Image (cartoon, grey):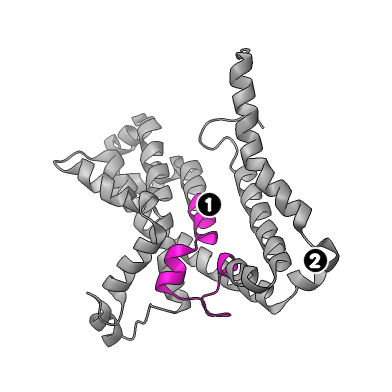
Amino acid sequence: MRRRLPIGVVALAALGAAFVLLPVAGLLDRAPWDQSAELLSSDIAVEGLRVSLLVSLGAAAMSILVGVPLGLLLGRTSFPGIALVRAVALLPLVLPPVVAGIGLLTAFGRRGLLGGPARAIGLELPFTTAGAAVAAAFVSFPFVVLAVEAGLRSLDTRLEDAASSLGGSRGYVLRRVTLPMLAPQLVAGTVLAWARALGEFGATITFAGNFRGETQTMPLAVFEALQSDPGAATLLSLVLVVASLAILIALRGRFIGAPT
């Protein structure tokens, strides 16, 4: 049911919307539209987009691999210390990205905790495309954890109980009943993780560097272009704004039942 809000609340809401829209309006105003075709087809834009897609898709896949089991654990079990496990799982959401990148270096760098064993099996992560994907996955997988845990808490367990009573094993019930019912939350969490990976900057540049064609994603390309060509940086920024807006529109109603 729609209700009228006090005029003060509406005014503050309008101020909040303006707070978001003004930077976007600034980008639209300063973008060199007459050079858009040339700038968006330049090497820095094309390579940045290619690397961004590789890194973000790899990060989304890793987020599913890590985030779904953690979400299932947090949403369906209870044990001493579960609050600590949840805090650790969600830590990348509040951890400064540069700190995340430094942490990854201390873990997987040449002199890191796992650097030696990783090199022994031929796995080099720092300053590689794979390393950029790992850095992006580290900061984005909590979105999958949150989506799965929230979805589990809202599920009607009667279908799972019925499948179990008919002889279904725990693995069968998980694969054929639980996960299909969680499909909307899984899709939403994965897309949000992908979007977060697409926009990652701090952890990527710290752990993987900024090498064009290898680890330079679109945000890093924007940063590089800003130093010498603000117009190109503005146009590349608008590409990311459009992509982010499209993601949010596609996900409308996934979490709060927003009207279409």
Q: Tell me the tag on residue 36.
A: 2
Magenta stretch: give its range. Answer: 192-220
Name the residue located 68 percent from the left edge and 53 percent from the top edge. Answer: 242
Among the 4 quarters of the image, the one containing residue 160: top left
Q: Mark 1: which amino acid?
A: Val
- Magenta-colored stretch includes residue 193: yes
Residue 48 vertical position relative to residue 29 in the rendered view, above or below: below
Which is nearer the N-term, disc 2 or disc 1? 2
Q: Do we see residue 169 in this rendering?
A: no
Q: Amino acid at mark 2?
A: Ser
Task: From the image, tell me which residue sits under label 1.
Answer: 191
Of 86 and 107, which appears nearest the observer? 107
Q: Give x and y (percent) for residue 18.
A: 66, 36
User: Residue placed at 69% from the left, 57% from the top?
Assistant: 238
Mark 2 in CB contact with mark 1 (< 8 angstroms)? no
Q: Quadrant of residue 234?
A: bottom right
Quarter of the image with the N terminus in it: top right
